Amino acid sequence: MVITGSWQGRPITISVKRNCLTVSIDDPSRADVLSYDLAGRLWTAFLDGIAYRRGLDGRMLARWRDPGQERSRVWLTPDEALNIESRAYHNIETLYQAVQSGDANLNLALPDEGHIAFQRVIAFDEKRSLADAQRYYEIYQPIGILPPDQYMAVVLQATEGCSFNTCTFCSFYKNRPFRIKPPGEFRQHAQAVKDFLGEGLSLRRTIFLGDANALVVPMPRLLPLIETVHEIYDVESLGGVYAFLDGFSGEKKSAQDYAELNKRGLKRIYIGLESGSMELLRFLKKPGMPDDAVQAVNAMKAGGVAVGVIVLLGVGGHQFAEEHIQETIRVLNAMHLDDDDILYFSNLIVSEDMPYARDAMQAGLKSLTQEECAAQGEAIEQALLLEYGIPKISRYDIREFVY
Ligand code: SF4
């Protein structure tokens, strides 16, 4: 339900949905827009031309674009994040007082669910926000990354870390030994996540089995974990189960295994292919061979599970560029990608502490510019044969990730 009106001489819009409350104050061209989940947590805010996204851990990413510039972003300090929350909170609190007193003119009366949503936001004050973020850290190990279409998932960490942890360009799980959660511990975790999200669960769209490599868990151990997910969550109405599978060595699942998993709600698996070049993968210390990834993808597709394949642009610099393009085209064309699948192009982001930075320096690699990375993606995209259908092709910027 969308309610419009005016308050303090400014237009307002209040949108009460089954999964969130959104309030817009002022003319659309310069409006402050605040969105909350139904537990009362700030989800997104747009204030003074800057877009803020609060993670469940209380951290906040600010993003903006200056005219003619690329998008800028910065993680706020805890105090800065609390200031934004408190500014948003003050707006909501005073607007709700005005709604109740009649000082805000609305074209329709606020429905009961709208009153409940406002009251939950007002109950979610600074103290509650800090306690909520603290609870998050009791339930979760830091969540390294998700594919962009899974940012609104319910993440359940069936495993922790990455079973390989050797890739020189990846620092998501460096200090975390890989382990599979025992069934009892996983059950407790899955229930704790549900209790933590509370009414905010309605904003979540899928279940994502974390961390980097949950699907390396052998079937006899994996199936009971997925059964547990079904016992605690309504998996179908949430949109199914999703997960990463990375580094194609070790235990391999068959098409029948994937069909079994699909029957239990597994919809899509995300694969960090990075490159189709064997030589480049060895340089990156990424385990497995490109043709193993082809086999794995085709087994998934034969089992009825969609895939999201991630290609890293710019990796290996100019020295590997031609081989990277040609071999990645070869490998992608050997995969039976169709309309259900996603092909992600992700630019390499290097920080000084990554082994990749040292290896690249020692090998004298010359980095690609943003434009050259984009051209690399286009060269790959142009050469896709698309014999089985047209996967969605999308960009993936790991710096935008917020859970
Ligand atoms: S296999 Fe994936 S998650 Fe593990 S270290 Fe390599 S890139 Fe990172």
Image (cartoon, rainbow, N blue to C red):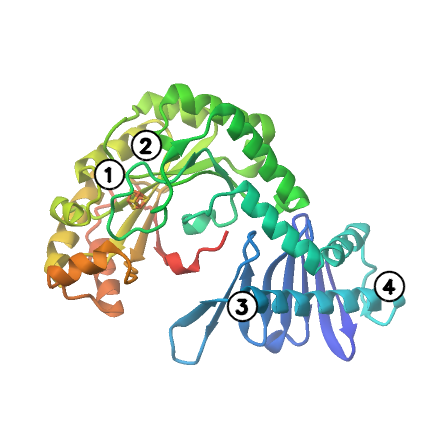
Q: Residues within 10 Å of mark 1 (few under 14, many from 20)?
A: many
**C-alpha distance separating marks 2 and 1:** 9 Å
The answer to which of marks 4 and 3 sits earlier in the sequence is 3
Note whether 35 is above or below 29 in the view shown. Answer: above
SS type, badge 2: helix
The answer to which of marks 1 and 3 sits earlier in the sequence is 3
On the image, numbered disc 2 is attached to which residue? Answer: 301
**C-alpha distance separating marks 4 and 1:** 59 Å
On residue 267, which mark appears?
Answer: none
Residue 119 point in image, percent of width and height: 78, 55
On the image, numbered disc 4 is attached to which residue? Answer: 100
**C-alpha distance separating marks 4 and 3:** 29 Å
Note whether 297 is above or below 323 in the view shown. Answer: above
Circles 4, 1 touching at the beta carbon (< 8 Å): no
> On the rendering, which quadrant does ligand 1 occupy?
top left
- Choose between 25 and 169: the one closer to the eye: 169
Q: Is residue 289 left or right of residue 100?
A: left
- Choose between 145 and 163: the one closer to the eye: 163
The answer to which of marks 2 and 1 sits earlier in the sequence is 2
On the image, numbered disc 3 is attached to which residue? Answer: 51
Residue at the (86%, 72%) spot, across then down: 103
Asked whether residue 383 is in view, the answer is: yes
Q: Amino acid at mark 2?
A: Lys
On the image, numbered disc 1 is attached to which residue? Answer: 335
Circles 2, 1 touching at the beta carbon (< 8 Å): yes
Q: Amino acid at mark 1?
A: Met
